[in-house]
Every structure is written in structure tokens, then in C-alpha cells.
Image (cartoon, rainbow, N blue to C red):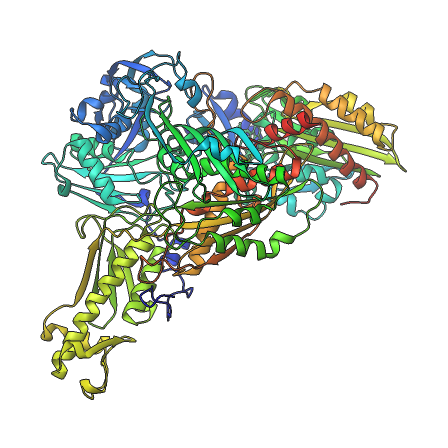
Amino acid sequence: MQYHTPPSFEEASRIAASASGTTRFLAGGTDVLVQLRSDLVTPDDLIDVKHIPGVKEIARQEDGGWRIGVAVAGAEMTEHPDLGRDWPGIVEGMDLIGSTQIQGRATLVGNLCNGSPAADGVPALVAAGASVTVTGPNGARDVAVADIPTGPGKTCLEKGEVISALNIPARGENGGDAYLRFIPRTEMDIAVVGCAVNLRVDGDTITEARVVLGAVAPTIRAVQACADALIGTTLDDAALEALDKAARAACEPIDDKRGTVEFRTDVAGVLARRAAKIAYARAKGEQS
Amino acid sequence: MALDGPKQDFKYIGTRPERPDGWDKVTGKARFGADFSMPGMLHGAILRSPHAHAKIIKIDATKALALKGVKAVVTRADFPEGLEGEDWNIQENVMAGEKALYDGHAVAAVAATSQLIARDALKLIEVEYEVLPHVTDVDKAMAEDAPVIREGAADYSVPEGMHPNVVRYMESGRGDLEKGFAEADLVIEESFTTEAAHQGYIEPHACVANLGADGKGDLWCCTQGHWFVRQMCTAVLGLEATQLRVTPSEIGGGFGGKTTVFIDPVALALSRKAGRPVKLVMSRSEVLRATGPTASASMDIKMGMTKEGKITAASGTFRMQGGAFPGAPVDVTTMLAFANYDIEHVHHVGYDVMTNRPKQAAYRAPGAPMGAFATESVLDELCRGLGLDPIETRLKNAVKEGTPATFGPKFPPVGLIETLEEARAHPNYSVKLGPNQGRGVASGYWMNWGGETSASVAIGDDGSVQVSIGTVDIGGSRASMALMAAEAFGIPYENVRVSIADTGSLGINEPTHGSRATFASGLAIIEASREATRKLCQRAADKWGIDADAVTWEDGCAKPSGPNAGEFDPLTIAEIAAEMGSTGGPISGHHESTPDGFGGSFGTHVVDVEVDPETGRTTILRYLVVQDAGKAIHPAYVEGQFQGGAVQGIGWTLNEEYIYGEDGRLQNPIFLDYRVPVASDLPMIDTVIVEVPNPGHPYGVRGVGETGITPPLPAIANAVRDAIGVRMKKLPLTPPRVLAAIKARD
Ligand SMILES: Cc1cc2nc3c(=O)[nH]c(=O)nc-3n(C[C@H](O)[C@H](O)[C@H](O)COP(=O)(O)OP(=O)(O)OC[C@H]3O[C@@H](n4cnc5c(N)ncnc54)[C@H](O)[C@@H]3O)c2cc1C
């Protein structure tokens, strides 16, 4: 195994493009090193992205959006004074990952690129409409976070492509987001179901909404029918009922040791309702 | 208290000094199993069967042996033949013979110059299997069409006509069931199941073995009992017992699972073959796949009760599988299932059944929690059906001194009633519950154990005391041992140093199991200390020129026993010790015995839960453990045992389970999916120590380690019943199961 510490994303991309065997980028390593130790994936080239300048920065952009470096750890996001005020749902999704020790290392981009349909950091990013900058042999391009995962453990990134930044749009007025997951315990578990809701209100009425479900399909899934159930409502009982129904209808889960199809489907509806209530309260400034 | 009862007035016993091993453990200096190494040491790795049941046709290690750095490969062919009984079982378990009997069963092992090379070498060993049909469920394993795990494994107790997988059968009871049930106003009959749970010790098994071709060897390992390790390893390898010296490391938990061997004989065999020391360390998934969890159970219970709450009759049938070998602890399950209560008409039937799962190992109160889950659930239903308070009803039926136990003998003094009274009086029992919340009560028992014990004390030249025991310290027992020696000598706790001796330094000691260490090693230390103080008194008597009978030992000094003995200033232990070289030589004390005055311990738990009606998830709100310790030598560590038992019980009840796929493979061999409770799942566990002195111990000690895991399964199940209105009869109470039950109710 070759271990690389490139000084730039271009160099990282070049190493990856010319590598012949299994390649992994090393951010926090909380997936990569675990897979290595348990003999699941032994990379031939391990490309550490943490030595590239700027990867540890959380920066507010001129338009009010955020640019998050690819090596920013969960704890750094949680402790940031402003990020969580804009995007509490994104921060709480990331904060759910692992324990204190894991939080010191795990990154959002790592969570995204590991490609798990149960990744806790990703649904709120998709609900927020976030994108990533991808640096590759043909230069840089922006890709919606929603388009990165293509199946369990798979992404749309081509050989030689590396994510060089995570871009979160400006929060704007009267918006709120939230992420909830279901696990049997209180931590150190994989989401049986995850749900992110991002919405905007005008007075009491919801004007924009995105609802994203995790762990109920081969990839994280943005559900338009759920958004439709919310838009134009004041999140009354009928809206919640419709949301619940739409969330359940969107589920195509697997039946496994972590949860039955029936259970995952039921809980997807429950979490959608609960997350919508939190996001709504946040949008109205009634809850932080 | 009778005059000849245990000592009651103490100076050091009952205080809470810091444990002597604490600093080393929190600063990382303590050496656990994997921390030991030797010059020239090789690293071992074990190849394990991916099949639940398969004939081993051929093992070809040629390619592995050709890999640079590989020094030895062993298979069953490297172990002696002709073993019998449990020796054979252990040998077959540590290295498969003709068949692989479960997913994870060892089939070969490698020693190499690095761990990575050893692991790579495993991939080069070619094993040809013929896959056989398998069975992992206890009820299915008893069915007519079940694959036979091993013909002829059953003992004499099994009646004719049963499936060969039934290897032991037991039946016991008294009275007339029919008459008893006829006297009842309400009879309830229900069936229950529990899944296998793993002890979940944080430290995986690890050892370093050094064995010569001459059959002389040393083993350093993480174990609860190094004499057991010595006996098992020497039997499995055909060595003479005392030629193998076993030294225990610090231990990161055992809970019964480290009273047997899994890797130690393999490391010894590799070492003998390679001619170098070999280290073997298990991974977590090896621990879960190939060490012993406890048994799983399937049970039918019938109990009858009068309107007033008197239990009139009880019967239970208990089927348990303990993996591919005999030994599921169903004998204990039957013995203790109804042991809390004074029942005239009672009957138990037990089946020990083999399946394609790893060989079960002891787990904290082996066999008791499953039975308690079933019987205390039915008792709860009876109380509900008759509108009775669960604590009052238990008090009405509780055993006390003189009650004939459901398993035979009359109880000596025991503290069940006291625990129930304390639980009833505790503020937790009267907290008002909110919606979706429920309260559960259950009691449980563990009879405890004495076991072979040998301990020594020796006086240092400054009057400090060195204590050598043979029971490994798992839960702070060095502190308790030091307290007992301090009390017996009348010297400060800090002046006592307790060491765990290796097998070359003391007579045989049973492991730290059966909740025996503080009872048995403690008793031995007190007796050994008394022998030493007698010698100290003799030295003083010699010096004073009086009779030894006229000298007493008090507060760390020899004193004339009364005015008739003469006027002498007391001689301190330090003063006598300073001269001992010239007054007769070193002073020590020794005691060895198999003490049988171990007193059982009863406990009562009260738990409050809240169940999310939309997800079926259970949160433990409050948890109270009340248990009889006889005498709490170090109350903080007694409380720690109570809390630990409750927490392991919470895990077993809510989320822990062995999940097997259709292919017979374990689906959850990592802590991610084998869900032990994490700290944030738990409230502070409240504790109350009841002290009904045990007349069989000089200070009144009862073992406390195991009872604590017996009541949680039913207590939590009863609380969930209270919260959701449905009786859950299958453990664990995972959210999908509870949600399904809630949906079926509505
Ligand atoms: C104890 C424990 C608990 C956990 N709990 C959770 C949990 O609750 N929820 C959850 O979702 N996950 C959990 N995880 C998984 C893991 O921590 C997360 O997925 C984490 O966010 C991964 O980030 P990382 O920086 O460690 O990624 P790494 O392991 O460094 O990388 C992960 C993947 O991302 C790729 N990658 C990394 N950076 C880039 C880049 N810049 N461009 C392209 N590809 C890249 C790597 O090649 C690799 O495939 C847990 C892990 C552990 C060990």
C-alpha cells in the first residue's frame, strides 16, 4: 500500500488518476481505516487529503452561503458559532455520527463518499440543496450532493475525481431544517431510518419544502410527494397525515437484522412528521 | 444476632477506599492480556469455518507454509487423541476435528513473524468442506427432522425416543400439581423465549504461550481462573498439570466467559511446533462468533394463585441450547426458576439441546435470568389478573430461613423479604408515572459458590502485610481483600498489598466465578491472617516469657489478655516484624479449604420505562436494585456489581441477541449490531444494599456478583407490559417487536 500526502487537489487527482489498483482518499479515516482493519477494503493507494491548504476551514461566502473544507471534523461543525444557527439540521445530522472520539475525525464529505444509504450527514445536505466541488483530470465541476451517491457504497465520482469543497447555499429568511434518525439505542448505531426536512415559511404557511429519507432505499431519497404534502399548509394535522403517507409510500427498504420492511416504513412516516415539526418551529424562529 | 454469628463491629470493613489497581488502569499502565510480549515472539491467527455445519474433507496448508515468515501451522492432527468427556469437548471446540460445528469454529491456526503475515497466511490455507444441513434454534433442533449434530452425545438421563440433539434431561419437583392448580383462583400458562446473549467483556481474549518440546511451558493470559486454564490446556494437549505455569493478566471483564479456554491451547500448540513463544489475540468478531455466549431458551410456565395472592402450584418446562456441545445451564434454570417462593406443589422439566452454535460459556448467574424472565412474567400476570400489588404478593410468598426451597433443602438465613421491604419503601416505587410509562418489579436469586481456595499472607520486615490470592480481580476485589486483611490484622488498608499469584505459587484456586471471590478468598485471607496473628502473639509471648494463651491480638498489636497475664506494653506488628528474623524466622499464614458456607443472595429490582408508541423504542427512566450482600466489605464495589448486573440485564432484555441467517451464519458479529447498552442509554442505577449476615463467613459476606442479572429481564418486561398493555414473551424487546405488538393491540 502506498500512502500519499498531496499538497493540492490537482495533485491528489493526478495520483488517483494514475493509480492502477484500489484507491481511497483519507479524510477522517473512520470508514476507510475500519474497512482496512476488518479486511473489507485494502487500498493500494491511500491518498490523505488533510495536508492540502484550506481543508480545515469553514467559511461564510459573500452570498451568505457556506464553504466547508473536506477535512472539517464533525466536532468543528458543532462548535462553530454561526453554522448551526443557519443550518441546525445539517449540523445535528453530522453530530449524530459516532462518539466524541469519532466526532474529532469524521467528515461530512467522507460520510457522503462512503456511499451508505444510512449516512446521517447526507439527508440534511440534500434537503438544503448543497453541492460539492469536484476536482478531476478535466478540471473542476460542481455536482449536487443529491447526485453523488448512486447505490450502496457507490458514487458517481469518476476515476481521478476528488471532492475539493462542500458548498451549502445561503439560509435566507424564514427557513428551518431538521434531521432525525431512528436507532434502537441512543448512539453508536447505524440509522434504521433517517429523515431530513428543510422548509421556508411565509407567516404560518409553508412555501418551500424538501423532505429527504435515509436508509429506506438503495440511496438517500428526496421525496417530492412529501414536499408537496407540506407546501401551502400550516403543518396542520391533515398535512402531517399526508406527509406521513407520502413518506411511507416512498420507502423501498430492505428487511434485515436492523429492521423489518414494515418497521422501517412505519418509522419513516413517524420521523417525517417529527422532523417537519422541528423544522417548522425553527423556520418560525420558535426553536433553535 | 446469635453470639456465634459473624463479626459485626468493624473498623475498616464497610469503608470505601480507592482500589489499588485504579490508577494503573486509568493511566494505561495496567497490563491486560494483549499487553504482554516476549523476545522472539511469533503472532498467531486462527482460520475459522464459514459454515454452520460441514464435514472437513481436507486441509492443505502447503501454500501458507511457503509464505515467508510463517513458522508453523497446526490443525487437529497436532493435538492428542483419546480424550473423553468435557476434556474432549474443549479440545473439539478449540480445534475442529472431523466436522466444523458452527460458524466461526476453528479449523487451523498459523504462527508467523507478524500479525499481518499470519493473517495473510490464513487466506492461503485451503480447506475442502462438505456442507451439511444445520440447525441453530432450540425448538427446531429437537424436532424429528433436525440434522443430528453428533450421534451418541446424550447421557444416561435422556429417555428413549428423543432426538439425539437432546443430550441431557432433568425432572424435579414435589407435591401434587393437580391439587395445587385446583386450589387456585387464577391459573396462567404461557410460553417464552430468550435469545443467546454474549458476556460482552470489553477485553477480547488474549494470551502469550511458550511451550517446549519437553512439555514444560508458561502461559500468560487474560482469564478469570488460571488453574482452570492450566487444567484445560494440559488436558487438551496431554501435558502434566504442574509443568505448565499460568500467569493471569489484568482482566477487562469476563462475566463467566473467561472461565474456560478458546485460544490458549492453540497458542500452546503453535508454540510447541514453532519452538518460539506465540501470541494470540482475538478480534471482536472472533469473540462473538467463537467464544461462548450464554444459552438461548424456550420455556412453558404454568402457575396458579388464590385471590389473596398465595401461589398454589407452579410448573415449568425449559428447553435450552448451548451450542454444539452439551452444557446449557438448564439444570440451574430448573433449580432456580421458582426459588424465590414458598410453593407446595412444584414441578420442573429441563432439556439440554445441541445446535450449530458456539459452545456456550458461563454468563453471570448462568441459566437463572431466562427462567426468571418466564416465571416472574407469569407472576406479574397473576398479580394483574387478581388486582394485587406485585411487592405485597411477593412478600406473601417469599422464602425465608427454614422455608423448604423448590429445589430441595431448607433455606439458611436469606434476605428476600428485606429486599422487598426496602424496594417498597424506596421513593422510586411511588413516583407517579406519565403516559406511555410503566413500572415493573421482579426478584431473583443466585445461590453463590465456595470452591477450592488457597491463600497466603506474609508479614514484611516493617510490619506491612503481603497477601497472595488465586482469584483474579475483576471487580475491585483486591480492595476488598486488603480491607479484610486490614481488619483481621488491625492495620491500615494502605499497609496491605494484595497480589494475584500464578499457578506456581499457590494451591489450586477455582476462578473468580460463582460470586465466590470475596466470599472464599476473603474467608481464606481472614483465616490465614488469624494464623499469622497467632504466630505474632507467640513471638510476643516468648519475649514476655508468658504463655501464648495469655496474649491477644488487638488493633495491630499483641497485648496481654488480662491483668493476670502480666503488665507489658503492647507490641506492634512492626516491632515484632523488625525482630522476626532472630525470633524464629519469617511470619506468614496460610489457609486452604473448599468452604461450603456460601450464602445465597436475593435481589429485587424496580424499573420504570417509557415506550414510544410510534416506534416501539423503550427508554429506561429509573432503575432500582435492592440486594442482600450479607456484609458489604467495600460498598462502592458492591454497588458497582448491582449496577453492572442491571445494565447487562437491560442489554439482554432490550437489544442484545445472536441473530443467525438462513445460512446458519452469525449476522451480527460486531458491537455495531450486537447492541450492548451504551452509557447514554442508561439512567443512574439506584442501589440499596441489604445486609443479612451470612453465618458461613467470618464477616458475614455473601457473593453479590451474579444475582443482579437475574431480575432485570422480567422486571423490564413487566414494566413494558405496564406501559403498553401487552405481554411480550420473546426477548429481546427490540423496537420492531414492540411496535408490532402495539399495532396488533390496537
Ligand atoms: C464508531 C463509529 C461510529 C459511526 N457512527 C456513524 C453514524 O452514526 N452515522 C453515520 O452516518 N456514520 C457513522 N460512522 C461512519 C463514519 O464515521 C462516517 O461515515 C464518517 O462521516 C466518514 O468520514 P471520514 O472523514 O472518516 O471518511 P473516511 O473514512 O476518511 O473516508 C470515507 C470514504 O470517503 C472517501 N473520501 C473521503 N474524502 C474524500 C474526498 N475529498 N473526495 C472523494 N472521496 C473522499 C474515501 O475514499 C472513502 O471511501 C461511524 C463510524 C465509526 C467507526
- When the figure is inspected, residue B740 is found, relative to residue B476, above or below; the finding is above
Q: Quadrant of ligand 1?
A: top right
Camera-side residue of B700 and A156: B700
Residue furthest to the right: A203
How many marks overall? 0
In this picture, residue A86 sits left or right of residue B94: right
- Quadrant including the C terminus of chain B: top right
Camera-side residue of A96 and B480: B480
Camera-side residue of B403 and B135: B403
Residue B707 spot, x, y in % from top left = 43, 47
In this picture, residue A35 sits left or right of residue B112: right
In this picture, residue B558 sits left or right of residue A178: left
- When the figure is inspected, residue B709 is found, relative to residue A43, above or below; the finding is below
Is residue B471 in view from this perspective?
yes
Residue B443 spot, x, y in % from top left = 49, 46
- When the figure is inspected, residue B564 is found, relative to residue A143, above or below; the finding is below
- Quadrant including the N terminus of chain B: bottom left
Residue furthest to the bottom: B567
Residue B500 spot, x, y in % from top left = 26, 53
Residue B572 spot, x, y in % from top left = 24, 78
- When the figure is inspected, residue B293 is found, relative to residue B428, above or below; the finding is above
Is residue A187 in view from this perspective?
no
Camera-side residue of B309 and A56: B309
